[in-house]
Amino acid sequence: MANTRARLEVRQAEARDVSAIAALVRRAYEDLPAYTFGEIRGQMNNYPEGCFVAKLDGKLVGYCATMRVTKAMAMRAHTWDEITGNGFGSRHIPNGDWLYGYEMCVDPKVRGTRIGRRLYEERRALAEWLELSGIVFGGRMPNYTRNRRKVTDPQDYLNKVVEGKIHDPVLRFQLANGFEPIGILEGYLPEDKKSKANAVHMVWRNPYVDSEQPKKFRLPRDVESVRIATCQMQARAVKDYEEFMRGVEYFVDVAADYEADFILFPELFTLPLLSFADQELSSQESIEALSAYTPRIRTALSKMALEYNINIIGGSHPTRMEDGDIHNVAYICLRDGSIHEQEKIHATPNEAYWWNIKGGDSIDAIQTDCGPIGVLICYDSEFPELARRLVDEGARIIFVPFCTDSRQGYMRVRYCAQARAIENQCFVVMSGNVGNLPNVGNMDIQYAQSCILTPCDFPFARDGIAAEASENVETLTISDVNLADLSWARAEGTVRNLGDRRFDLYRIEWDGRVGKPGDAAGVAEDAGGRPLGTRTMGGG
């Protein structure tokens, strides 16, 4: 008799599952807002070991998201937004002694096949393997509104469910899986109308761990090395497109010889393509001429990334979009052959006036073979909310291509980039142009000192600078950074900016249209083409 393939697969969630997870959550919770793709990517990136999916006959039918937290975080009163970092799972504590389950959903069409139980078993197995104290979450009570007149308050409702006097399918399932209620979390999820925003504070205690003397976790000082090259590029006149690209390829070749994982080029690094025009072009003519090179630039950078086995952050290049507007776009060409785009969100007054450049409307982390990264083009680094979104999605390196004419302008970007590194406990890489371009308007003088910046804490360089170029000299600056140092700093550092945020007082609320199905950015839609919302329910 022939063997048959297993119908059910339960495994760790992967980046390729993002779209299917978003669609599943929409099917499972039609009465609640759904996740953006960026939030789902953040959940996986921030703690990949805690996110699981279940696939039945090849279709994704279950998903759960989990993170590690401290006992203090787990046991005190909290809201879903507060403890999950607004749905991104970004308050994950690498050395936390409790697992916190903040998402669990199963396709309504397959309920009864114990998919939820299997996902709970994966969580329990993870907690036991790590020797954690247990699992905590806020469980929904969806029949509370229906039975509101039969009880005095949420606690009374919980008591009657436990006594078997009222039926609640969600609470019954959680009780059957060995969880015990320890109280009510009021205002846990305002969007959950059926539960009147309440949730039951549920706990499972690991029987293999002594609750009186829980294990203390220290994060090992591992090595997760990434080599970064930042190209401080001379703006020089060239005779044709081929000469310009030879100059670009030279730096890619050198960075590859040093086995760099990334090379970053400056903002507007393609402006030398205007230098061989017969006469100085007007601002509008310049933009049209540059935008015409876009397909060739994308193809050339992608080809180099493949051939030299290096991830290329292509500075930025003015591009006319389908709606006719000009945007300042970074083309990120990865060594696996994929091409990603990141538009500059905030056009400077200079760009808007001279070139009529419009700001983009989408920003998200980009998946690479060295983990998720982010790109903030020059002025965007001066807006803290953008970097925070990228880091919430899991980015540990933020690349900042810039183009500044004076030292004052440069220092604005430099100081803000250093602040982003500190407040987000991440690495920030800067790359700028130097020199000038005759006959190219708005490129009269350039000032740059490209660098690789770090948080300011014990594992990093004393002054927060991993590497730095000489001022106004064309050069390639290369340095190794240890991504594992970021994890250590976030868990055991002198300050812990990400974990210590006061979500009970403030948070950033992103428009639901931000973020797209691709790995970079855009609008998330379900299978029916409806835009997905800003976040969904938690609850287990």
Image (cartoon, helix red, strand yellow):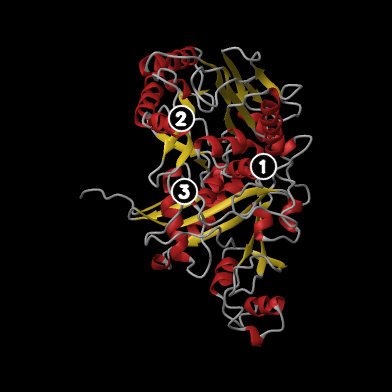
260 lies above or below 31: above
Please say whether residue 183 is visible from this viewpoint.
yes
Q: Which residue is drawn at the image coordinates 51% and 70% (left, top)? A: 31
Three-letter code, disc 2: Ser
Separation of disc 3 and disc 1 at Cα? 20 Å
Disc 1 target residue: 384
In front of the other: 224 or 472: 472
Disc 3 target residue: 522
Residue 165: percent from left, percent from top: 62, 83
Please say whether residue 367 is visible from this viewpoint.
no
SS state under label 2: loop
Counting residues from the start of the chain, the first of labels 3 and 2 encountered is 2
SS state under label 3: loop
* Furthest residue in direction bottom, as rendered: 149
Three-letter code, disc 3: Gly
Contact, mark 3 vs mark 1 (Cβ under 8 Å): no
Separation of disc 1 and disc 2 at Cα? 34 Å
> What label sits on residue 282 in the rendered view?
2
